Amino acid sequence: MRKMNSLYKYAVAFMLGLSVLATSCSLDVDPRQSIDADGALNTPDALEASINSVYARLRAESTYGRDLFAMADALADVGRTTNNSGRLIGENNNNPNAHFTAAFWQNSYFAINEANLILDQLTRGVDGASAAQLTRWEGEVKFLRALWYFNLVKVYAYMPTAIYQPGVTDEGGVPMPLEGSIASDIAFTRNSPRASIQENYNQIYSDLNDAIALLSSASRAGVQFANAGAAQALLSRVALYRGDWTTARDAATAALGSNVGTVLGGEAYVDGWRASVHPESMFEVRFALELESLGVNVSLQSSYTALLNLSNKNAQGGWGDFIANQRVLDFFGLSQIQIGEPETDNNNWDVTRNNDVRGQLFTTGNTVRNAGRQIESIKFISKTGFTFADNIPVIRKSEMHLNRAEANFHLGNTGEALDELNAFKSLRGLDPVTLSGDDLLEELLNERFKEFVFEGQRFFDLKRYGRDLDKSYLGPTNFVAFDDFRILPPIPQREVDGNVNLNQNRGY
């Protein structure tokens, strides 16, 4: 018998004998909780708890807890590592195999299998469930399955807008099982191949369109749960990555017209980053309890700043492993400035800033990590009231303006694209520009760069335009051409070894 190596085989072995604790409707659900083979989902409480488990997996370090933001930006041209803890250095240098890890793949497919099992149960029915519950459950799970598959395909495959094809094309999308595995014999025989990239995007579209329709009539309160506006917003982002400009524009317009999230400008935008729940959030990953904190080593707060809080810069917090490069500092006019005496007190240091309000989301750190005082991002710094567990905005409403502007540019509506870009710049304190052609596109992408620094979008924006990673600021050899195999990560080798139908990415 073949060794039980592939993900679903691993997942099933882990899941058998475990059951959902159907006692809570909060997100305080251990992601390891799963579904047994005895119909554990056939009650409303169990179904609710199992859905919360799919949400809870989003908090993992390998996913939104750190890697989809901090690691993605380290792979791109956003910043540099400080060597305070030694983390993210390989990724920042784009070393072979220093990329998204097996934990990301495994956590994603665990969540997808849970989602599939829930959807399978919904087709069979749930005793005592109301029609509204059934509608909401299906809408939430389809949103979540779309999000998980989208994250997988954007990481492990090329974008539809920029596919590198060597002499023998061996890449594809990602495996896409749509039924849950609960018995080991199914897992042993499944051996799912990689779907095509277009098949992945077609399924994501299908799930999101279903979610929009279902959640329009039934949804939970709170942006930590899927909702119709968030589904429209995610569809806009997916369509942007696909180069489906009409859908990207129309879905962005629908999302902006929803009552979920608020587009902020000026000081209100800065204050939004100090709120526990970001007012712009259309969907976010929620850390509800201190015990859910990822701790001092790998949280976003620790990855970006050595500060514990903003009230006392001398208090030791995280590691400040990843900080802005000079290009990002120049975006916002950032340089260190002493504002008081004595010089040794970290509270007597801040940064200069230009008129762009986003510069207020940076300040000087401290010297407690012996790496010297650095300019650090403070988008994530104890906003929930406990350290190293900030709620994470996955989709902010402001993104929809940039999505729509970029989509209109590609649709030939350059006047509308320029007007929207300038209206957005005004929200951030910037003067309007008069541009056309390629110059306008570059300014649109530059505005995305500035808006989403330390939010993990830059790497994927470069990837979807087929652009090289020019990181010469780290050294003369730090340049990764788009046709370099390091643009994609390796699929975990044990998955390839255990699945005869699963081909590895080029170069590994």
Image (tube, grey):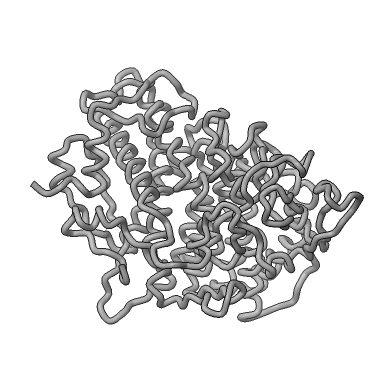
Task: Answer left or right for 9 relative to 451.
Answer: left
Q: Quadrant of residue 30?
A: top left
Task: Specify whether residue 205 is in view.
Answer: no
Residue lying at the far left of the rendered structure: 1
The residue at 81%/57% (across/down) is 351
Task: Specify whether residue 239 is in view.
Answer: yes
Task: Answer left or right for 349 relative to 507.
Answer: right
* Numbered label tally: 0
Quarter of the image with the C terminus is bottom left
Return the x and y of residue 164 as percentages of the image width and height. 37, 75
Q: Nearer the viewer, residue 210 or 70?
A: 70
Return the x and y of residue 73 as percentages of the image width and height. 55, 60
Q: Nearer the viewer, residue 450 or 146?
A: 450
Task: Answer left or right for 239 relative to 40.
Answer: right
Return the x and y of residue 40 as percentages of the image width and height. 28, 23
Q: Quadrant of residue 82?
A: bottom right
Return the x and y of residue 163 as percentages of the image width and height. 38, 73
The residue at 74%/68% (across/down) is 330
The residue at 54%/72% (across/down) is 411
